[in-house]
Image: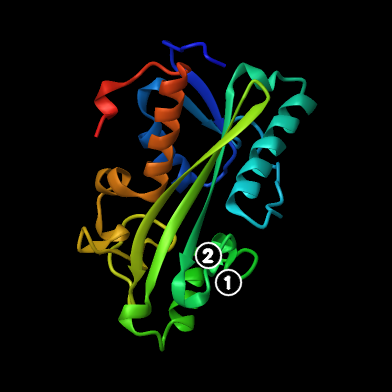
């Protein structure tokens, strides 16, 4: 587990979400060759996210893909398997939508469906009570062993959407330090501060400290 890699590391990510895959490739950089489960031929693989926490769901997605590789006669230890799970936790809603953020408005819900439901539920909520945070948990499997890290971004929920970039709840999530929503930021700006980027920086730092990854000085903040 302590062997340091100098060549690009092949990573298989347990997602079919193209928006998430786009972000991950930008966050991981040139040290990794990233392939989604769909690109690897597992587009029909459905992993039920039955966990009650983000950690449990991230691990389920990694384990599900690991087992799928074994069933196909492939060596899951020949690459790194990675998954993340993200939730929006709203103070005024007792932490909802939380682990159900991606399907808040029901199975098959679109981004717009989820945003509209959140807006509806918070119609009577005053500004001072609109605190919220995004949290991302990453699960990484190397050589059959899985570890997790997390990243958190604090913000507030707006009444109306602002911005057209990003995805999910980004148009409603206002970051006070930036004075704008995540959807009003460019990809580069969002990737500098987002919950997902913080989780991935934590993961890369952990791997560098373990000696499993050569330190990249260009990624220093």
Write down the quadrant of residue 163 in the picture. bottom left
| Residue shown at 41% from the left, 29% from the top | 204
- Nearer the observer, 165 or 200: 200
Q: Is residue 108 above or below residue 10?
A: below
Q: Secondary structure at mark 2?
A: loop
- Circle nearer the viewer, 2 or 1: 1
Q: Secondary structure at mark 1?
A: loop
- Regarding residue 160, the answer to whether it shows in the image is yes
| Residue shown at 46% from the left, 54% from the top | 135
Contact between marks 2 and 1 (CB within 8 A): the answer is: yes
Q: Is residue 69 left or right of residue 101?
A: right
2 or 1: tag closer to the N-terminus: 1
| Residue shown at 48% from the left, 49% from the top | 136
Disc on res. 105: 1
Q: Position of residue 18 (x, y in %)?
A: 48, 45
Disc 2 residue crowd, few under 14, some 14–19, many 20+, Cα 10 Å: some
Q: Position of residue 189 (x, y in %)?
A: 25, 47
Q: Position of residue 111 (x, y in %)?
A: 48, 64
- Look at mark 2 in the image and give the residue it sits on: 110
Q: Seen from this angle, which residue lies furthest bottom? A: 124
Looking at the rendering, in which quadrant would you find the C terminus? top left
Looking at the rendering, in which quadrant would you find the N terminus? top right
Disc on res. 181: none
Write down the quadrant of residue 143 in the picture. top right
- Regarding residue 116, the answer to whether it shows in the image is no
| Residue shown at 68% from the left, 52% from the top | 49
Q: Is residue 165 left or right of residue 85?
A: left
Count of marks, rendered view? 2
Q: Is residue 172 left or right of residue 4?
A: left
- Nearer the observer, 93 or 39: 93
Q: Is residue 124 above or below residue 95?
A: below
Q: Position of residue 153 (x, y in %)?
A: 37, 55
């Amino acid at each position: 587990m302590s062997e340091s890699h100098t060549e690009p590391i092949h990573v298989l990510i347990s997602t079919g979400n193209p928006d998430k895959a786009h972000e991950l490739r930008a966050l991981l950089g040139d040290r990794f060759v990233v392939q989604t489960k769909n690109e690897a031929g597992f587009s029909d693989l459905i992993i039920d996210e039955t966990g009650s926490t983000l950690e449990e769901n991230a691990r389920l997605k990694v384990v599900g893909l690991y087992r799928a590789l074994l069933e196909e006669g492939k060596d899951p230890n020949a690459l790194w398997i990675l998954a993340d799970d993200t939730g929006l936790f709203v103070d005024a809603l007792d932490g909802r939508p939380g682990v159900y953020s991606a399907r808040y408005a029901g199975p098959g819900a679109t981004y717009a469906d989820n945003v509209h439901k959140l807006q509806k539920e918070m119609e009577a909520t005053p500004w001072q009570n609109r605190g919220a945070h995004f949290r991302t948990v990453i699960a990484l499997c190397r050589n059959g062993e899985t570890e997790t890290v997390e990243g958190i971004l604090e913000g507030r929920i707006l009444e109306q959407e602002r911005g057209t970039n990003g995805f999910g709840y980004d148009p409603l999530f206002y970051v006070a330090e930036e004075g704008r929503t995540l959807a009003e930021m460019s990809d580069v700006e969002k990737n500098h501060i987002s919950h997902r980027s913080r989780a991935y920086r934590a993961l890369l730092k952990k791997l560098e400290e373990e000696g499993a990854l050569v330190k990249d000085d260009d990624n220093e903040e």
